[in-house]
Image (cartoon, coloured by chain):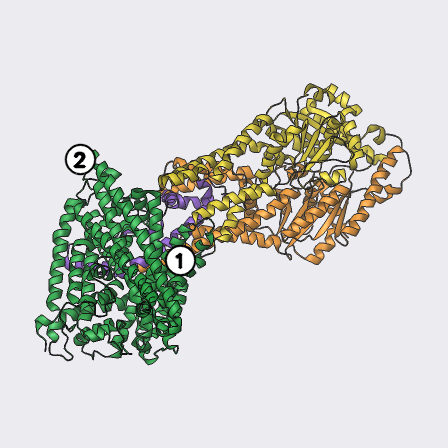
Chain colours: A yellow, B green, C purple, D orange
Amino acid sequence: MPQLLAQRPKMRYIFTGGKGGVGKTVAAAGLAYHYASQGERVLLASLNPVHSLSSLFGQSLSGGKVVEVQGAKGVHAVEVETTEVVERYRNSIRGRVKEFLKWADIPLDAKPFIEIATTNPAFEESAMFDRMVDYILKEGEAFDRVIFDTAAVANAVRLIGLSKIYGLWLTRMIDSRKEALSMRVQLSFRKEKVMEEVKKDPLMADLISMNERFEQAKGVLVDPERTAFFFVTLPLALPIAVVRRFIGMVQKFNIPIGGVIVNEVLRPEIALQEGAGEYLGNKYHEQTGYMKVLYRDLGPLVRSYIPLYASEVGGVDMIRRVSEDMMSYAPPFAAELSGGA
Amino acid sequence: MVGILETPFLWVVATIALYGVAYWGYGKWIDRNVWRSDAKKATPAHMYMDGVEYFPVSRYVLWGYQFKSVAALGPILGPFIGVTFGWLPALIWIIGGNFFIGWLQDYGSMMLSVRKEGRSFGPITYEFTGARGRTNLLAFVLFYLVIISAAFIALIATFWNAFKGTTFVPTIGILLTGLLCGQLLYRVKMNVFAVTAIGLALVGLSLYLGPIFPVVLPFGLWNIAAWAGICVLILYLAAVLPTPTFIQPTNYIAFYPAFAAIILILVGALATPFTIGASPPVGIQLDMGPFLTDPQGVLGPIWPILFVAIACGAISGWHSLVSSSSSAKQLDIETDALPVGGGAMLSEGLLALAYLIAYMVLTKSFVFGVAGDATNPPHTNTASWPVGAALLVSRIIGVSATNVLLTTFFGLVLVIYALTVQALVTRFFRLVAAETWSEGRFRIFGNKHVSTAVGLGVPWVFAVSGSWWALWLYFGGANQLLAGLAIMLISIHLARVRAPTKYSLIPGVFMVVTTLAALIWQTWTFLYSVWLFLQGDKSWIVRNVRGPIQADPNYILVAVGINAVFVLIGVVLFGVGLSMSIRLFRSYRSSVVEARGRAPAAADGGTRER
Amino acid sequence: MADSKDPTTSKSRGRKVRDAAKGVMYGMAAHGHVTAALRTRMYLEHLFMFITLGDMLGVPVIPPYYSLRILPYAVPNIKSWKQRVFRERDFTDQVF
Amino acid sequence: MGLSTYFEKKGDAGIVIFAGKGGLGKTTCSAGLSHYMASKRNRKVLCFSTDPQASLSDIFDRDIFGKGLISVIPQLDVVEIDADRRVADYQEEVKQKIRSMYGLTDIPAEIEEYIDSTSAEPAMYESATYDAMADLVSTSGHDLYVFDMPPFGHGVRMIAMAGILSKWVGKITEAREKAQEYEAVAATLKGAKISEDEVLRELQEIQTKITRFTDLMVDQRRTSFFMVLIPERMAILDTERALEMFDALGLQMAGLIVNQVYPKELADAKGGEAVEFLRNRARMQQKYLDEIRSKFAGKVVAMLPMYPREPRGMDMIEKVSQDLLFGPAL
């Protein structure tokens, strides 16, 4: 890991993803702590629909505001909230519906319809993405590094990939909006007035600005100099399978891959010593087996290891330990395997 | 005994003949040489066909629709005031006005709208006079609607109050029937013939019940006010319920009795010579000859008053709205505009004539009332029309002219006419209000219920306080002014396409000048009344108001206030109308100049706008 | 809609007159009602189409998943629908 | 005594849902229960997941993702829904319909573009997943559905989607019906005959499908909703949060399943550093197990041990199913 970080000093935007429960948040926190300990200002942003930063650090970081983590100087954390953004979307749409119903004299209550038209679950996701872009383009500027703890990998990739998907979607939206507005002008008798309204059509403005920002964001997200996506996994079959499956997808969105971080690695000196009992022994052998597979498939990408600790990772002190181990620890089999690879 | 010459018969024949000339002669000529209507040119109905607002409809259907929409209360009450100057001037205006102006307006505004992609008046005004002009029109229409409402509410109240209270039950009957028919159509999805049958049966029933359960309010002088209140409540409901479930079915079911009345009276009027010898004789009664000079001296000089008193039948601005708002969007081919627009208007002229005859066959004292006669005080005998109509009809169906069912029937027709039109007007007011106050500080007035309440409350105040003929003249003034403005729009368009304009310009100018004059006169009357009051003469003040305010000396200051308010209304109507006219004249002038600049290739009937 | 159009097909004079009379009666009695009903329907349809295919107007509404099931039926009307939605209406258009 | 007691009390459940934070063993439980119900209780079971991470493929050790119904053992079918694929097929279906309806060889460009671009619509993915589930449950004709739900946040959205979509369909149906009403009146008045509305028919179809599904989902009698967690602080905290969300969506939890529990005796085992390591873990777990007991009193219906080997493959699943149904509860 240290070498990588050394090679990529300008790496500002770091994402961690992986199968649920593999310790994405732990890894992200570890990285954040590491940079902070180098005296940098680090922002650790959780993009999970259900945040776990607070529970990890054992202190309230919720509320959607950036706060400095107590006891971890330089680490700033935020559990990203989307409510405001979503509300903005909904309002601009409400406006449009009202405009439609201006002369309408209908025998049923339009309110519920407006409600439905404005409850689009996609808003959550796009809002989340919107905020992410904010943290990349705006808030992020105030920090030396921005580390995103994303949702389970599929969604994470999707979320990042949205810069591409939204690209398509937005351009279509903008086109059809353009068509709509030009039709309005064409079919109006008060050309000037309507022209004015059309010029400052809030929805159009929203769409366009979004598009621009997404374009910028895309530029950042695909720049291997500045961005890296880390897969977190356990030395187990399922999580590794997931990594294997999604690494291609990440490349498809040409998001630069930072590497793989292996979590909960059993230390041989613990597992194999006298009196350890066959339980740990089995686990250890199982683990090495899976590690072989991992190395076979994406050996050079394995960047660092987080050992399995005697107690659950939680609280700043544990995080410190994690960050140190991430930078330094390598289980003995790593060397031989990579040698073998 | 009366001879054929003393019956209205010849007048009817003469009018029909003259209208024939107006249609086949003058009309066709205008259509060919001024508008150059072209059956091959695509109309908006085809260009923007959407099956809802724009779609072609056969000329017969459209004629029926147009006729139904334009022929309502106007031709009944206009003549009622008109005859104040004697029946001959009224007759001449109904014939001449319609011949040179009336049909020309209805037809012209339809053609104009057709040539303007089916745009209605607002947009056309906007095009010709700019945003300000349209706002100006908006303001004018707003007041116009208030005044119509006031006049109609007053009338409905008066009618319910008159006829010994026999018309109320049938009215409610018809409204409920309408509601029921709506439900039968929408919920039960019943076949339309069945619905009609049921509806008519119920209408008949309620008509029959009318005289059996007469409703007479106990409030004496306050009766009118109370009736007006009831009327307002009904209208409020009509305005807030969706049109297709209440107003429309009611219109539908109410159409049949109204139609029957029209036919009966027309036939009756034609039949007069052949019923000679009957007693009381059905001849022209209005004694003192065909000319009268305003027996009560309340109205003012025959010019301009007569010309605003008789609106529909001679010419009415309301029609231009109908023509451009819906009919023009559904005109199948341009050449249909003459039969639909012009034809409908000329037919309404006949209607006005027939109704005028309904007054002609009554005695002067009956129509105008007798000073000091409590049962028939001067100028309040609104029962005249039903009675006259009954008299005409009684002869051909062979019942007594005083048959209560017959008079109730005609009274009912009167009320229903007023009510259905007024329901429309109220709804329209709501829309205009919504447009005027859609945003800004007074947004609240744009609200459905608030605007409806305002659009009924304010008129109610006028209705119960001002004497109704005063209201009617304001309404006439505004309405005819609107007609004038419509004709000006037409002239502007014709000028722009370098078609001959004098045939519309002259009537346009005449209408504008006349109506503005009428408005001034009216305003002046009220102002003068106030002035007299300050001199100590209360008579005029009192004369302009009605009901308890008129009777009770304690209300004298209220009366003065009302007069003052009427002055204000007059000033506003005049002011807004004047500025609108000026804008239009300006626009006309510039159009002429600008058109001269263009190659004389125009006069193509307007294709060059597209 | 155009079935209220002049239905005279045969040349027979009596027939023509009868149809004309029918047309006139229909026009006087029902036409207004019909157009009013159609207008109300139009606004309901606007609402419907807006919520199903609203993103055709560049308004991001509910996911179009099930809208696609409806799309095939809407195809012929889309143009006129857009026209109707976007035509600027004036208060004088609404009188009747 | 494990889930078996629960199901004896409960009788035949229609749907069993396993929800939980990622990686805590939802898939394991789903597989275990399905296997038991199919092999021992002889029910016709469909085990499905909407999670693109294809954990079922991994645990059953065969490629299931997007392959449709795969029968792994008699009576037990497994499905992993591939939403992206479904969207694509669906679009083609729609295009085909348009072509055939109007006898077109190619669709108007505008329309075609529209259809294509919908796949970019952000919520299309969820809708498709949701629709796929609805289809499965309302048509596949199994008598037990085991739903391996995606991790919390997205699981919640999944359910929310159900609510929104059915409301949506309901509303537009209402609008459409009213419109038809007026259309009909216009027709009767014109003496024309009323044409029945295909759109409405289409809508009603969708409606019935959705309602059948959502009814089943929230029907307390037919549906059992389990949460899986492990005895760790974060897991407990997150589970609490998630519970509130699901509650809000009308999904009542039937019980908790605690996974990856170290044998109790380890907690007070004697021995060297290694054992100490395990002891720590075990003790920690005991602490959190107590916390779970107090926080979710009476809710815990089953416990799964920390297996020496990652649960995978049939024999492992069978073992899990034993522990799941008959293993010791708290």
Q: Residue furthest front?
A: B535
**Which element is circle 2 on?**
loop
Percent across and percent down for residue B548 are 37, 73
Percent across and percent down for residue B152 are 32, 64
Which residue is labeled 2 in the image? Answer: B601
Q: Left of A190 or right of it: where is C60?
A: right
Read off the chain for label 2: B
Read off the chain for label 1: D
Q: Quadrant of residue B514?
A: bottom left
Q: Can residue D317 be seen in this view?
A: yes
Between residues D164 and B1, which one lies in front from this camera angle?
A: B1
Asked if labels 1 and 2 touch by Cβ distance under 8 angstroms, the answer is no
Q: Quadrant of residue D84?
A: top right
**Which element is circle 1 on?**
helix
Q: How many labels does the image show?
A: 2
Residue at position x 41%, y 67% in the image: B233
Q: In which quarter of the image is residue A70?
A: top right
Q: Which of marks 2 and 1 is in front?
A: 2
The C terminus of chain B, quarter of image: top left
Residue at position x 29%, y 45% in the image: B583
| Residue type, mark 1 in image | Glu
Between residues D97 and B291, which one lies in front from this camera angle?
A: B291
Which residue is labeled 1 in the image? Answer: D181
| Residue type, mark 2 in image | Ala
Q: Left of B415 or right of it: where is A232?
A: right
Q: Is residue D80 visible?
A: no
Between residues A57 and B582, which one lies in front from this camera angle?
A: B582
